[in-house]
Image (tube, coloured by chain):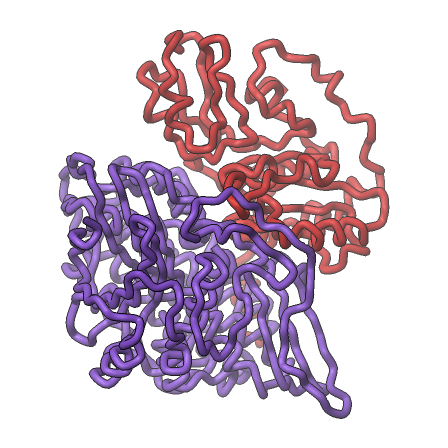
């Protein structure tokens, strides 16, 4: 055992201090594509045709993006003849209202989006999470369990995973909610004490895409549970998860409004 | 018309349902091994196919039974076919007579979907139902307790329900009930453009994104006769081995966690994180997604200097593996834990490190080379004992081999195209592709008509190894269960699909 104690001490701290300072660990990681309407050619629908999940729809000859359906595949970026769809590093896409993931040029005021329910002060510095896999591809689990690795070290932020829903403040759901997982998910929710919160983690949990059609498909949490934070991403990276958790705890601002990054 | 379809990596032989048992026995007698079975409907005619490997022969053999929806079950003869036959019963509406375990598998008891989603008719039924306990062998006796653990379990884990019958510490019987995560992936491919469906393959099992996409692309390339340029083949090796690297570091982190070696677990997970961050810097995706395409890669990667970038990870990884190897408290928990015999591994269909730890010397990268593996040198580690220790030793060796492959492949990169030019042929084609994933053999079979997918079959390594795993749990004890499960390194999404 001294061997491990010694190597552990010698290695020193591996944890980042982000978001206070330091790096988030996501250098180079591509996020949701940005749309630059100024260079978009009217009447062209290459982006909508290229999107495998139907996240881009044409409305009045202009693309309208629902980032809640985006799986970050970058097909639209490759197909757009004008370069109006651009790759970006916008992955911190956690929002408190589902509609904020949908492209809208007429931004509502940020104040209007404040949720009526505020997070209890006691939860802001000590949050316990119960995770439920409702049919994910396991990339989300891989990133969520990475939160406990020494680099992200989630405990430093006062956030913990708990095995029992009885001790949980937040239900973190991944996957589109398959038929067989519907009842166990609701049972877990019922077992949680109030006040309780829900986070839809990953594009599947937000909208079901791309697992929504078909005999075993499902469309995420929208009609199943009251969601407090929506976080699309395929999968959302650990820093995006941390941002969404701190957004929920009112410790970080929301970056996205009306589908536009930096507008929140 | 369908009989004219050619497929390059396999030889096809037609068999009557009545002579199937005898033919299967002949194949076993000549040292062939069954790999998988699946069904398809070609012009409304049911075709059941069995795939076999033939020792040194690089060509796989397909046995085809055409025109029967009721077939004799081969499970008593070839136990590893048990789950494939049950899956065809659940999803295809076929019947296998004389099946020794004739229970539902993919569609849970209490749930149904009508008509069968991979049946003769295209239906639009939805999977519906309510929870009902699975059929279990009746266990009676003094102080026998039953534990249903799951589907929502402790920690951040994938969903599954595990049933234990036990007395005190001793486990009498263990049954994993999976397929809570069944998303109907095979049906999801049907009707999609074969060129574009790579994104779906990447999302069958997230931590296997590269291998799934690679096996899928290779299946389409075999169907369309596409030659992938050499630079793309080397880059495919590089991203596949990077995937192996982070999966194996995760494996050792998790294994150390189950033996309560806290610093060892933290070390493993940190190394995994560093490989994922490197993957993000190199490709824009921590899971190396959105890179593979039919014909090669979607874009070029600057991987020439990968060996020097990897150097700190290589050094620390080697020191980490050595430290684990010197920790008696860790090794004590692995030795003799969860023994899988060579016979059971062969009969029940174990694959990957699990099979190699039980003395089965098989690796698709060497036996049926794909991408650029034929041009690279690597060893395939094999152990005989079949316990958790042997499985972790095989993984450790295979991690070192992955590093050697990364260094070799990046050193051999020369400028050149990364995507082949091709035209999508009209008509109907069959294709077969495979990859040796960190967890074992993965196979994709595709049938394409005029550029659109008509049928996709996915044989995932975890589907094979989950069938084998319970054999190492019956008659063992509760204390060892978590260690044994971690030593198998299974995923559930890959199995459930």
Query: In the image, is residue B72 above or below residue B160?
Result: below
Q: Position of residue B476 (x, y in %)?
A: 58, 86
Query: In the image, is residue B318 above or below residue A258?
Result: below
Chain shown purple: that is: B
Residue A148 picture quarter:
bottom right
Name the quarter where the N terminus of chain A is drawn. bottom right
Query: In the image, is residue A56 above or below residue A216?
Result: above
Q: Can residue B151 be seen in this view?
A: yes
Q: Where is residue A76 in the image (x, y as percent from the top left)?
A: 38, 25
Q: Where is residue B120 in the image (x, y as percent from the top left)?
A: 41, 51
Residue B61 picture quarter:
bottom left
The residue located at (16%, 67%) in the rendering is: B58
Q: Can residue B271 be seen in this view?
A: no
Name the quarter where the C terminus of chain A is drawn. top right
- Left/right placement of residue A1 relative to residue B30 reads right
Count of numbered circles in the view: 0
| In front of the other: B87 or A159 | B87
| In front of the other: A168 or B167 | B167
Q: Which color has been applied to chain A in this rendered view? A: red
Q: Where is residue B300 in the image (x, y as percent from the top left)?
A: 25, 37
Residue B155 picture quarter:
bottom right
The residue located at (62%, 36%) in the rendering is: A243
- Left/right placement of residue A202 relative to residue B96 reads right
The residue located at (54%, 39%) in the rendering is: A212
The residue located at (73%, 40%) in the rendering is: A225
- Left/right placement of residue B354 relative to residue B229 reads right
| In front of the other: A151 or A235 | A235
| In front of the other: B187 or B480 | B187
């Amino acid at each position: 055992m001294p061997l491990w104690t010694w190597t552990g001490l010698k290695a020193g701290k591996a944890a980042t201090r982000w978001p206070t300072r330091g790096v988030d660990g996501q250098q180079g990681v591509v996020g949701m594509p940005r749309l630059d309407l100024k260079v978009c050619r009217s009447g062209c629908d290459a982006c909508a045709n290229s999107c495998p999940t139907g996240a881009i729809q044409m409305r009045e000859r202009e693309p309208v993006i629902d980032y809640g359906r985006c799986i970050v595949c970058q097909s639209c970026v490759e197909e757009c003849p004008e370069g109006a769809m651009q790759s970006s590093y916008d992955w911190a896409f956690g929002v408190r209202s589902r509609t904020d993931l949908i492209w809208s040029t007429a931004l509502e005021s940020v104040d209007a989006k404040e949720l009526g329910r505020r997070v209890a002060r006691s939860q802001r510095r000590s949050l316990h999470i119960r995770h439920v896999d409702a049919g994910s591809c396991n990339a989300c689990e891989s990133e969520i369990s990475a939160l406990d690795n020494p680099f992200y070290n989630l405990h430093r932020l006062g956030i913990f995973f708990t095995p029992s829903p009885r001790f949980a403040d937040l239900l973190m759901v991944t996957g589109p909610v398959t038929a067989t997982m519907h009842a166990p998910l609701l049972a877990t929710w019922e077992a949680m004490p109030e006040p309780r919160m829900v986070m839809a983690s990953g594009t599947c949990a937000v909208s079901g895409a791309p697992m929504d059609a078909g005999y075993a498909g499902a469309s995420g949490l929208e009609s199943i549970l009251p969601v407090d934070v929506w976080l699309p991403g395929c999968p959302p990276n650990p820093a995006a998860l941390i941002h969404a958790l701190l957004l929920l705890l009112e410790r970080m601002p929301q970056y996205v409004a009306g589908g536009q990054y930096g507008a929140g | 018309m369908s009989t004219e379809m050619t497929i390059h990596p396999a030889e096809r032989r037609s068999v009557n349902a009545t002579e199937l048992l005898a033919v299967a026995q002949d194949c076993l007698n000549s040292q062939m091994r069954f790999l998988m079975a699946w069904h398809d409907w070609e012009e409304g005619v049911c075709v059941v196919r069995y795939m076999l490997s033939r020792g040194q022969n690089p060509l796989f053999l397909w046995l085809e039974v055409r025109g029967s929806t009721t077939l004799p079950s081969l499970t008593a003869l070839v136990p590893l076919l048990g789950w494939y036959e049950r899956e065809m019963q659940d999803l295809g509406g076929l019947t296998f007579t004389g099946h020794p375990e004739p229970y539902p598998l993919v569609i849970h008891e209490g749930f149904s979907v009508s008509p069968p989603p991979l049946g003769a008719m295209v239906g639009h039924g939805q999977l519906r139902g309510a929870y009902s306990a699975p059929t279990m062998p009746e266990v009676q006796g003094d102080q026998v307790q039953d534990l249903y653990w799951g589907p929502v379990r402790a920690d951040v884990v994938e969903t599954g329900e595990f049933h234990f019958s036990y007395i005190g510490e001793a486990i009498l019987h263990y049954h994993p009930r999976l397929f809570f995560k069944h998303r109907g992936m095979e049906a999801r491919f049907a009707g999609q453009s074969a060129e574009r469906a790579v994104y779906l393959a990447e999302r069958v099992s997230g931590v296997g994104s590269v291998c799934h996409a690679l096996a899928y692309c290779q299946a389409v390339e075999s169907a369309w006769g596409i030659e992938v340029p050499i630079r793309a083949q080397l880059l495919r090796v590089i991203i596949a081995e990077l995937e192996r690297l982070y999966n194996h570091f995760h494996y050792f982190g998790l294994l150390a966690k189950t033996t309560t070696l806290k610093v060892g677990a933290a070390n493993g997970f940190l190394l995994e994180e560093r490989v994922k961050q490197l993957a993000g810097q190199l490709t824009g995706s921590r899971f190396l997604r959105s890179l593979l395409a039919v014909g090669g890669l979607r874009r070029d990667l600057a991987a020439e200097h990968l060996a020097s970038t990897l150097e700190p990870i290589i050094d620390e990884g080697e020191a980490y593996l050595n430290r684990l190897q010197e920790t008696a408290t860790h090794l004590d928990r692995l030795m003799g834990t969860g023994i899988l015999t060579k016979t059971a591994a062969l009969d029940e269909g174990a694959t990957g490190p699990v099979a190699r730890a039980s003395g089965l010397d098989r690796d698709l990268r060497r036996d049926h080379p794909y991408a650029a593996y034929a041009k690279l040198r690597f060893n395939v580690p094999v152990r005989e004992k079949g316990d958790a220790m042997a499985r972790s030793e095989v993984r450790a060796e295979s991690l070192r081999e992955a590093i050697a492959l990364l260094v070799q492949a990046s050193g051999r990169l020369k400028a050149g195209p990364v995507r082949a030019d091709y035209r999508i042929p009209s008509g109907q084609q069959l294709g077969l592709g495979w990859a040796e994933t960190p967890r074992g053999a993965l196979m994709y079979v595709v049938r394409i008509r005029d550029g659109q997918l008509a049928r996709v079959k996915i044989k995932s390594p975890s589907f094979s190894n989950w069938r084998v795993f319970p054999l190492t749990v019956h008659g063992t004890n509760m204390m060892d269960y978590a260690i044994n499960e971690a030593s198998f390194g299974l995923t559930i999404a890959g199995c459930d699909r």
